[in-house]
Image: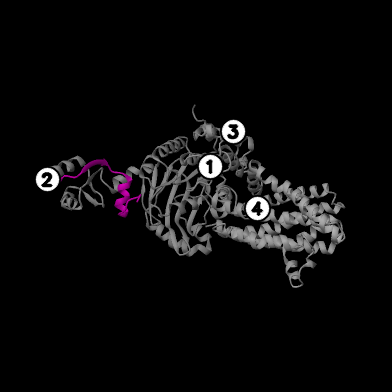
C-alpha cells in the first residue's frame, strides 16, 4: 500500500461521520420505534382521537381540521426530541463513557472534525426522522402542495437549532445529571406550549411573547405553514433565520467547548 | 498457524523523509527562534537541556525532544526533558505514577500541545503537522477507548476508516491482526465481555491497523494479571522483532528490562537517568542484591552493621537491601555472625534497584 493511500484523501469530518453511521448500522433497531412508530401513534392519538373531539366542537383550527393542524407541529417537536437526545447522552458517551472522541483524536482527525462529523450525523438522523414523519403526514392525506417537501429541511433545521447548542453544553458536563433537567424544564414545556397542540394566541397574553422566542415555536410555525401550503416568504425567512442563528451560535459555542474539553 | 503480521509490516517505506526536518543531534536554536511567543520558555528549557546529558539515539531519530515542558495551569507535569528515539528500537519511559510519562506520551502522539521546548515527531512539528504525523502513529492509550457495543472485528474496521484505509483492505488486515492478537475466535463477539488482557490486545491490534511507523504504548500491561501480561509482552516482543519502533511507558521494571533497548527513568517530570537497562544497572547499582527480612524491627536494627560489608544499604520498612558484587558472601557472613534473618535471598540487581537508588522510593507502591 502506498504512502499516499495511507494518508488518505477523504475529508476528515466525513471519517468521523462514518463512525456514527457505521455504529448505527449495528444499533438501528432500537431507534426504529422513535423514527417510524411514534409519528403514527401520535398522529392517531392526537389527530384522530383528540381531533374528532375538537372538530366536533370548534369545527376547525386555523382553518383546517385538528389532525392537519397538529400533524406538522408534531413533525417539528419530533425533530426537537431527536436533536436533544442525539446531543446529550451520545456526546457524554463519546466524551467520557466510551472515549470515542479520544480514540478519534489519536488518528488524523482534529477536534473540529470530531465535532463536524458528529453534527453531520445528527443532521442525517434528523433528515430520516423528518422524512418518515412527512411520509406519514402524506399517507394521512395532510400534505397539500409541493411546499410540504420544504418542511423536510425545516424539520432538520429545527432539530439542529437544538442539537448544536446542547452539544456545546454537553461537552462542558462531567455527569449526565443536567440532561434530565433539560428534559424536564426544557423539552417538556416547549413540547406543550410552543403551538404544537393549540395556537399560542390561546396562551395568556403575557406568556405569548415568551412562547414566541422559543426555538420550537419557530420550528412549528415554519413546518406547519409549509405543510399546509400557506407559507409566506417573509415569515418563513424570519423563522428560518432565527433557527439558523441559533444553530450557528451553537456550533461556534461547541467549537470552543469541545476544544477546551479535548485539547489538554 | 504463524501470524501473518510480517506480510504487511514488510511493505513500509524507507526512512528517507525522516532525516530531513529535525537535524537530530544538532543544536535546536532555529526551532527556538521560530516560536517567538514561546521563546522565553524555550530558552529556559533549552538551557536546562544543554546542561543535562542527552539521551542520543544511534540512528536517525523518529522523535527528538529538547527541553520538553508540559504545564497544566500552575502544575508542571513534564519539566524540560530531552531524548531521541531511533527507528526500530524499543524506547521505554520508566517511572512511578505521576512522573510525567503519560503527558510525554500524549505530546509525542500529537494529542496534547507542547507547553515549552521543542518536539519533532517523524521530522515534523506536532503544532503544525499533527494530522500528518498522527496518520503514521499507532497509539495504545492508558485507558482503553474501544467501542464496547461493537464487535471485536468492527472495532478494528471502523478505526482503520479514520485513516482512510479502504474497507476491503481494512477487513483483510483486521483478520491478520486478530490472528496476531489471538482474538480470531472472538472476532464477531461484542467487546464488552472480553477480559482486560483481551481488550488490551485488541487495542494494540487496533493501533496497528494503520501500519504505523511508530507505536506508542502507554502502560500497556497495567492492571493485568501476570499471565495476561506475559502474553502481551510476547506480542510486543514479536512486533519489535518485526522492526516496529515502540515507545512504551511502564512502572514494571521487568517489562522495561525485557522489552526496552534504551530507556529513561522519569521522576517528578524530569529524566533521572537514561541508558540501556544493563548500563543503568552497572552505573547505579552493584551486580547482586541481598534481600534480608527480619522477624522484628529490633532484629533488623541489630543487623545494620552488616552494611559495612556491602557497597550500599537500603533499609525499607519490610526488608533490608544490601548491594554487593558477591551476595553469597554477605549471606554467609550474616549467618556466621549469628544474625538470622527470617529469609535471605541473593538476586541480580534490577532497574527497580536503580530507581530506588535514584529516587529513594519504590516504583510500585
| Residue B112, image x, y percentages | 52, 55
Nearer mark to the viewer, of 2 and 3: 2
* Residue that badge 2 annotates: B337
Q: Which residue is at the front of the view, B49 or B183?
A: B183
Residue B271 appears in view:
yes
* Residue that badge 4 annotates: A86
Is B247 covered by the magenta stretch? no
In what element is the residue under mark 3?
Answer: helix
* Residue that badge 1 annotates: B192
Q: Earlier in the sequence, mark 1 or mark 2?
A: 1
Q: Earlier in the sequence, mark 1 or mark 3?
A: 3
| Residue A247, image x, y percentages | 70, 60
* Residue that badge 3 annotates: B172
> Could you classify mark 1 by the number of other residues whose Cα lies within 10 Å: few (under 14), some (14-19), or many (20 or more)?
some
Report whether A11 appears left or right of B148.
right
Nearer mark to the viewer, of 4 and 3: 4
Q: Which residue is at the front of the view, A199 or A118?
A: A199
Tell me where the magenta segment starts and ends, as one range.
B339-365
In what element is the residue under mark 4?
Answer: helix
Q: Earlier in the sequence, mark 2 or mark 3?
A: 3
Amino acid at each position: 500500500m502506498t504512502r499516499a493511500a495511507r494518508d488518505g484523501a477523504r475529508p476528515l469530518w466525513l471519517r468521523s461521520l462514518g463512525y456514527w453511521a457505521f455504529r448505527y448500522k449495528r444499533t438501528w433497531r432500537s431507534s426504529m420505534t422513535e423514527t417510524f412508530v411514534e409519528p403514527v401513534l401520535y398522529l392517531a392519538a392526537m389527530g384522530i382521537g383528540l381531533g374528532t373531539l375538537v372538530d366536533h366542537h370548534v369545527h376547525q383550527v386555523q382553518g383546517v381540521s385538528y389532525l392537519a393542524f397538529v400533524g406538522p407541529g408534531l413533525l417539528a417537536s419530533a425533530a426537537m426530541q431527536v436533536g436533544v437526545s442525539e446531543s446529550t447522552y451520545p456526546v457524554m458517551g463519546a466524551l467520557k463513557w466510551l472515549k470515542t472522541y479520544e480514540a478519534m483524536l489519536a488518528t488524523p482527525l482534529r477536534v473540529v472534525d470530531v465535532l463536524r462529523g458528529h453534527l453531520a450525523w445528527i443532521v442525517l438522523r434528523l433528515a430520516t426522522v423528518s422524512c418518515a414523519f412527512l411520509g406519514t403526514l402524506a399517507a394521512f392525506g395532510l400534505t397539500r402542495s409541493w411546499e410540504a417537501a420544504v418542511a423536510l429541511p425545516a424539520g432538520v433545521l429545527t432539530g439542529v437549532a437544538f442539537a448544536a447548542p446542547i452539544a456545546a453544553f454537553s461537552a462542558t458536563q462531567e455527569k449526565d445529571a443536567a440532561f434530565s433537567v433539560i428534559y424536564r424544564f426544557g423539552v417538556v414545556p416547549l413540547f406543550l406550549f410552543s403551538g404544537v397542540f393549540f395556537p399560542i394566541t390561546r396562551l395568556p397574553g403575557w406568556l405569548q411573547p415568551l412562547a414566541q422566542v422559543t426555538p420550537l415555536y419557530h420550528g412549528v410555525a415554519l413546518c406547519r405553514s409549509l405543510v399546509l401550503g400557506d407559507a409566506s416568504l417573509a415569515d418563513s425567512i424570519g423563522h428560518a433565520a432565527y433557527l439558523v442563528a441559533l444553530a450557528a451560535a451553537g456550533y461556534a459555542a461547541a467549537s470552543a467547548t469541545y476544544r477546551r474539553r479535548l485539547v489538554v | 498457524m504463524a501470524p501473518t503480521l510480517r506480510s504487511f509490516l514488510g511493505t513500509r517505506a524507507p526512512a528517507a523523509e525522516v532525516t530531513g526536518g529535525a537535524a537530530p543531534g544538532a543544536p535546536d536554536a532555529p526551532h527556538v527562534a521560530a516560536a517567538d511567543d514561546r521563546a522565553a520558555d524555550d530558552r529556559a528549557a533549552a538551557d536546562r537541556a544543554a546542561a543535562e546529558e542527552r539521551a542520543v539515539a544511534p540512528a536517525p531519530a523518529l522523535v527528538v525532544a529538547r527541553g520538553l515542558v508540559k504545564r497544566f495551569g500552575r502544575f508542571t507535569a513534564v519539566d524540560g526533558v530531552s531524548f531521541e528515539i531511533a527507528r526500530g528500537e524499543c524506547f521505554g519511559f520508566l517511572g512511578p505514577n505521576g512522573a510525567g510519562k503519560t503527558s510525554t506520551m500524549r505530546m509525542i502522539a500529537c494529542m496534547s500541545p507542547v507547553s515549552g521546548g521543542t518536539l519533532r515527531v517523524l521530522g515534523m512539528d506536532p503544532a503544525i503537522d499533527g494530522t500528518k504525523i498522527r496518520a503514521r502513529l499507532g497509539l495504545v492509550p492508558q485507558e482503553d477507548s474501544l467501542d464496547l457495543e461493537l464487535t471485536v472485528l468492527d472495532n478494528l474496521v471502523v478505526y482503520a476508516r479514520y485513516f482512510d484505509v479502504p474497507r476491503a483492505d481494512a477487513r483483510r488486515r483486521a483478520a491478520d491482526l486478530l490472528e496476531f492478537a489471538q482474538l480470531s475466535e472472538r472476532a464477531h463477539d461484542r467487546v464488552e465481555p472480553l477480559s482486560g488482557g483481551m481488550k488490551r490486545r485488541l487495542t494494540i491490534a487496533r493501533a496497528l491497523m494503520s501500519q504505523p511507523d511508530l507505536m506508542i504504548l502507554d502502560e500497556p500491561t497495567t492492571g493485568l494479571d501476570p499471565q495476561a501480561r506475559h502474553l502481551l509482552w510476547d506480542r510486543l516482543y514479536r512486533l519489535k522483532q518485526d522492526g516496529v519502533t515502540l515507545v512504551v511507558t511502564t512502572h514494571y521494571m521487568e517489562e522495561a528490562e525485557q522489552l526496552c533497548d534504551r530507556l529513561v527513568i522519569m521522576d517528578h517530570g524530569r529524566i533521572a537517568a537514561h541508558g540501556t537497562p544493563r548500563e543503568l544497572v552497572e552505573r547505579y547499582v552493584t551486580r547482586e542484591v541481598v534481600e534480608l527480612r527480619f522477624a522484628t524491627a529490633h532484629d533488623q536494627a541489630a543487623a545494620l552493621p552488616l552494611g559495612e560489608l556491602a557497597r550500599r544499604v537500603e533499609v525499607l520498612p519490610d526488608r533490608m537491601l544490601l548491594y554487593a558484587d558477591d551476595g553469597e558472601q554477605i549471606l554467609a557472613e550474616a549467618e556466621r555472625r549469628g544474625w538470622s534473618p527470617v529469609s535471605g535471598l541473593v538476586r541480580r540487581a534490577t532497574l527497580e534497584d536503580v530507581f530506588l537508588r535514584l529516587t529513594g522510593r519504590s516504583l510500585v507502591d
